[in-house]
Amino acid sequence: QVQLQESGPGLVKPSQTLSLTCTVSGGSISSGNYYWSWIRQPAGKGLEWIGRIKTSGSTNYNPSLKSRVTISVDTSKNQFSLQLSSVTAADTAVYYCAREPDYWGQGTLVTVSS
Amino acid sequence: QTVVTQEPSLTVSPGGTVTLTCASSTGEVTSGYYPNWFQQKPGQAPRSLIYGTSNKHSWTPAHFSGSLLGGKAALTLSGVQPEDEAEYYCLLYYGGARVFGGGTKLTVL
């Protein structure tokens, strides 16, 4: 069974870049015709789709975040990553990685604070 | 900006049936929006239940079903169990982009 695990700093300073990695286990990230996604959830609020990538490199981003988001993939490490630049307190959330349309990671809390 | 709307909250009795809906600000929801449904319990990651309107995963309980109803996507729980109490989110596809609904808090009482 495919498993996903998010990793990265739990604390990021305002104006800096948030960087997270999702490691996929139980299968190759390159097998199948899947998209790999990032989603976030501020405390007590709903889910927000951030974007997705295919191992071909094709990406789609949330228009409201597009100017600040980069999603990349490293097939040799079976990982994909999220970078979100110029962060503010509003970017504080639990960040999830997922394989569309089925498996999700457990999530990682990222706090933006000085 | 596209908005996906769900009922903020619903209450159902154990053993009862409840339908949650998912509407798009762009108009009628069709199969082309590939509706997905997720369940999230407190402190847990969301879990996918339904994809592509009505397709279930191997782990999706049998009493959950997805459909299109009155221009919206719908998630129906038949024979509701206490453990179904959770937040439910729908997700619609808009070309390459995706938009989540605001979620429905389902109370089993």
Image: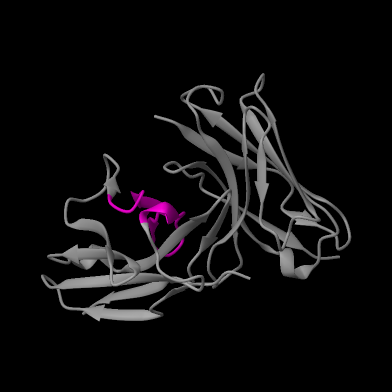
Q: Is residue A19 above or below residue A94?
A: above
Residue A78 horizontal/vertical position (percent): 61, 25
Total numbered circles: 0
Residue B6 horizontal/vertical position (percent): 41, 74
- In the rendered view, does A83 fall on the left or right side of B59? right
Screen quadrant of the C terminus of chain A = bottom right
Q: Is residue B9 above or below residue B97?
A: below
Q: Nearer the viewer, residue B80 or B27?
A: B27
Residue located at (17% from left, 51% from top) = B62
Q: Is residue A42 above or below residue A70?
A: below
- In the rendered view, does A52 fall on the left or right side of B68? right
- Displayed quadrant of residue B57: top left
Screen quadrant of the N terminus of chain A = top left
Q: Is residue B33 magenta?
A: yes
Residue B80 horizontal/vertical position (percent): 17, 67
Residue located at (58% from left, 48% from top) = B96
Q: Which residues are magenta?
A: B31-54
Q: Is residue A82 magenta?
A: no
Q: Nearer the viewer, residue B34 or B83?
A: B34
- In the rendered view, does B61 fall on the left or right side of A97? left
Q: Nearer the viewer, residue B62 or B82?
A: B62
Residue located at (83% from left, 54% from top) = A85
Residue A22 horizontal/vertical position (percent): 62, 38
- In the rendered view, does B4 fall on the left or right side of A78? left
Residue located at (27% from left, 46% from top) = B56
- Displayed quadrant of residue B79: bottom left
Q: Extreme top residue here? A: A76
What colouring style does the render use? one colour
- Displayed quadrant of residue B68: bottom left
